[in-house]
Amino acid sequence: MKNVFFILLAFVALSSAGAAAVYLTGILALGLVFFCGFLFGVFLMNLKLNVKNDRINTYKRELEKESITSSENSSKVKVLESKIEVLEKALENALKK
């Protein structure tokens, strides 16, 4: 929704610059066209940065999920290893008796 708003605002700015260039002459028209072009560039870069930041945040979330999964798996392995050690000791004690 925010992206649509920026595109619409940029379109209005460019169309008003074109209309101003038709009705105004000289340095005023040039200044207005420059200002509207500048605004369009700012809105366009804002749009690009928002898309890039969304992708980066998505990638960060995926990395966090993978990190959590790998830490869970390593803790499960440690628990199983400790259980195996306990069972081996119990077996050795049973065989000694």
Image (cartoon, rainbow, N blue to C red):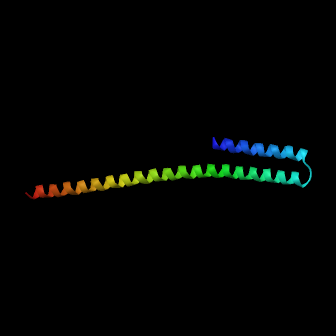
What residue lies at 56% left-to-right and 53% top-to-bottom?
A: 56
Number of numbered markers: 0
Q: Which residue lies furthest to the right in this view?
A: 25
Task: Give x and y (percent) for residue 61.
Answer: 49, 50
Q: Is residue 66 left or right of residue 11?
A: left
What residue lies at 81% left-to-right and 43% top-to-bottom?
A: 15
Image quarter where the N terminus lies is: top right
Q: In this view, does 48 lie to the left or right of 37?
A: left
What residue lies at 64% left-to-right and 52% top-to-bottom?
A: 49
Where, by quadrant of the figure, is residue 83 drawn?
bottom left
Image quarter where the C terminus lies is: bottom left
What residue lies at 73% left-to-right and 44% top-to-bottom?
A: 9
Q: Which of 1 and 86 is in front in this view?
A: 1
Where, by quadrant of the figure, is residue 18 drawn?
top right
Q: Which residue lies furthest to the left in this view?
A: 97
Task: Give x and y (percent) for residue 88.
Answer: 19, 56
Task: Give x and y (percent) for residue 81.
Answer: 27, 56
Q: In this view, does 26 lie to the left or right of 67?
A: right
Q: Is residue 63 left or right of residue 72?
A: right
Q: Nearer the viewer, residue 93 or 68?
A: 68
